[in-house]
Amino acid sequence: MAIPSKTPLHQCGVALLTVLFILVLMTTLVVYLVEDNHMAVRRVSNHRDFEQMYQMLVGNEQWAIKVLERDMKENKTDHPNEVWNNLLPETQVSEGKMKAVVLDLQGRFNLNNLANKDDLWYPLFQRLLRVLEIDEGLADAIVDWIDADLDVSGHYGAEDPEYLLANPPYRSANRNFASTGELIWIAGFTSDIVNKLAPYVAALPSSTKININTSSIPLLRALSPQILTEPAAESLQSGQGDEGYEDIEAFLAASELAGLGDVIAPLITVSSRYFEVRGQAQFGRLSGIVYSVLEKDASTQQVKIVQRRRGFS
């Protein structure tokens, strides 16, 4: 009679470990597959959200273009009570929201007007700096940033020799501003100064006059060789009425500007060519903003995009 053999204890332990190893391996594989599938779904979802959000931003821009084109055909002046100044308040849409704001960039001082340091725009900019309680000598640093030569202008001017000593070193632009954000790179300009000046300046691709219907109190004060008082500038602004000044003659007829017509007339206008659209959109988990500079073309009666900056999060 045969005696049954017994399985050694260590063999049972090996079998158990093998089973546990296979179980862990399968669990890991399942988790990996589930996670990979989850990531794939997330990528598709993010792509969908991005496309939807971007189309909303483009829609904001195109809506602004159509409104400005219609305005150009119907009106010869630009003022705050027009449709473009109330383009699209925050609006809820399915799974998101959108908003668009239009700014008249010619209600601001065009930094690129300083390229030649002439007797027209340079003194005006110095007065604007005084109104804002910023050292007017910094106007020279801006002139040096955009002029083509390497000659230092005034006490506050700066050219390549100074910028090359920075860490890291860089050179002056020697060209027109592409964006007002360049101000932070100019000698003498701190973040506080840039933040104080930014609401009153623009960087436009061609020389522009100031639209008196959309300009700010500080800029209206700076129009006069003898800086106007704040109440005087407020009176000029209120004189726009609901439809803005129809022409510059109506503006210059104000008592606050008596005898200043010949000096101020070359600086001002009642219509604008350049506008900025700030379009915001949020869809799903993504949000974004687009800054678009638009130009009215009187010859074609159309509005074109001349610059676009965007950011997403």
Image: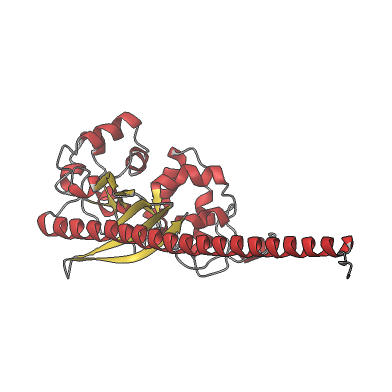
Compared to 209, does 26 lie above or below?
A: below
Residue that appears at 64% across and 60% down: 27
Q: Residue furthest top?
A: 231
Q: Is residue 88 left or right of residue 1?
A: left
Residue nearest the viewer, comparing 106 with 98: 98
Res. 309 image quadrant: bottom left
Q: Residue furthest front?
A: 1
Compared to 212, does 110 lie above or below?
A: below
Coordinates of residue 265 in the picture (x, y in percent): 25, 51
Res. 128 image quadrant: top left
Coordinates of residue 285 in the picture (x, y in percent): 43, 51
Coordinates of residue 215 in the picture (x, y in percent): 30, 44
Coordinates of residue 71 in the picture (x, y in percent): 15, 55
Residue that appears at 58% across and 47% down: 190
Is residue 19 visible to the viewer in this orientation of the structure?
yes
Q: Is residue 285 left or right of residue 156?
A: left
